[in-house]
């Protein structure tokens, strides 16, 4: 066994190496350590709340294909809108403008109040707020990598009727040909636009040293579609339009609404009695009027 150091080893480094060798020679099973901190709001994978599979079920294969293709098409349209609104280099320009304005504001605030141009600090603060809003909007825009991740996620949706959908970030990254960090950023943006929703889950595994002791750890998300509730109205209406077009391609048409016929109200005894009273009152008026009686 040979040890190669890229630099001069320290006393602490020698101690860590000696401890590792001692544990390996001892033959004892290494423990996983304390419970890893899971995300806030995680649900145990066995709980019913962590299994939203009924939202991922489709009535037919045509319905599934129409929905998936329409969602991917909507994501591509959002990506095109984002690219048109923020051309290449826009983010760098916004950051440069923010840096220059911040430096100018700092320089102005260092002057005496009498030497500051009236209204200039307020104008700079307004411009900085607008730049901050643009950068935030830019960070939430759909990118090409996000579209690739979105297409890859649907590869793991069970279309056999169960609706189970819980791929790991590693599997999604491999299918989309990107890194796991890109998957995390893409999911955040897709969730912001309502294209995808998920529930964070956790699970328990036995410790190596003591199988009777359970250790809680993070596991993959449970994904589901909640489009009407989470999508913007404009985006959802566009999705419905694209989905209806694809439904027509499969011969699925909306059932024509049957014209509703006005229901005649049942005759009421009170109404009939009122009509007889009015008729009798009119006859009495005609009889009491001499001119009309002769006619």
Image (cartoon, grey):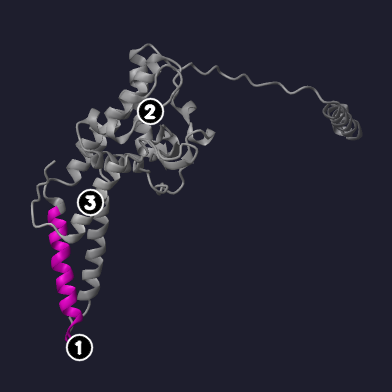
- The dot on residue 114 is 1
Residue 255 in the figure: left or right of residue 120 = right
Total number of numbered labels?
3
Magenta region, residue range: 92-115
- The dot on residue 240 is 2
Looking at the rendered image, the quarter that the C terminus falls into is top right
Q: Which residue is mark 3?
A: 18
For the question of whether residue 73 can be seen, the reply is no
Q: Secondary structure at mark 1?
A: helix
Q: Position of residue 113 (x, y in %)?
A: 22, 86
Q: Position of residue 137 (x, y in %)?
A: 27, 50
Nearest the eye: 3 or 178: 3
Reading the chain from its start, which is encountered first: label 2 or label 3? 3
Q: Secondary structure at mark 3?
A: helix
Seen in the picture, residue 2 relative to 162 is either above or below; the reply is below
State whether the magenta stretch is mostly helix, strand or loop.
helix
Seen in the picture, residue 90 relative to 200 is either above or below; the reply is below
Q: Position of residue 198 (x, y in %)?
A: 41, 37
Distance between the alpha carbons at the discs numbered 2 and 3 = 64 Å
- Hey, which quadrant is residue 248 in on the image? top left
Residue drawn at 45 percent across, 42 percent down: 215
């Amino acid at each position: 066994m040979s040890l190669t150091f890229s630099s001069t080893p320290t006393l602490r480094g020698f101690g860590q190496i000696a401890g590792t060798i001692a544990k390996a020679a001892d033959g004892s099973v290494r423990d996983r350590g304390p419970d890893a901190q899971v995300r806030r709001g995680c649900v145990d994978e066995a709980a019913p709340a962590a299994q939203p599979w009924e939202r991922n079920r489709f009535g037919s294969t045509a319905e599934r294909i129409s929905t998936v293709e329409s969602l991917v098409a909507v994501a591509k349209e959002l990506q095109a809108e984002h690219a048109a609104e923020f051309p290449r280099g826009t983010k760098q320009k916004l950051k440069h403008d923010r840096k220059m304005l911040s430096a100018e504001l700092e320089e102005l605030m260092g002057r005496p109040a009498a030497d500051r141009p009236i209204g200039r600090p307020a104008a700079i603060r307004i411009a900085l707020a607008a730049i901050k809003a643009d950068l935030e909007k830019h960070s939430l825009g759909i990118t090409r990598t996000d579209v690739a991740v979105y297409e890859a996620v649907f590869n793991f949706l069970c279309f056999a009727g169960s609706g189970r959908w819980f791929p790991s970030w590693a599997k999604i990254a491999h299918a989309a040909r990107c890194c796991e960090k890109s998957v995390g950023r893409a999911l955040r943006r897709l969730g912001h636009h309502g294209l995808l929703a998920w529930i964070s889950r956790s699970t328990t595994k036995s410790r190596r040293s003591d199988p009777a002791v359970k250790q809680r750890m993070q596991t993959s998300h449970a994904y589901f579609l909640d489009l009407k509730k989470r999508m913007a109205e404009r985006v959802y209406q566009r999705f419905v339009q694209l989905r209806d077009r694809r439904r027509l391609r499969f011969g699925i048409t909306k059932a024509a609404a049957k014209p509703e016929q006005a229901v005649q109200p049942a005759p009421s005894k009170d109404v009939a009695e009122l009509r007889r009273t009015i008729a009798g009152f009119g006859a009495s008026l005609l009889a009491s009027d001499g001119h009309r009686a002769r006619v």
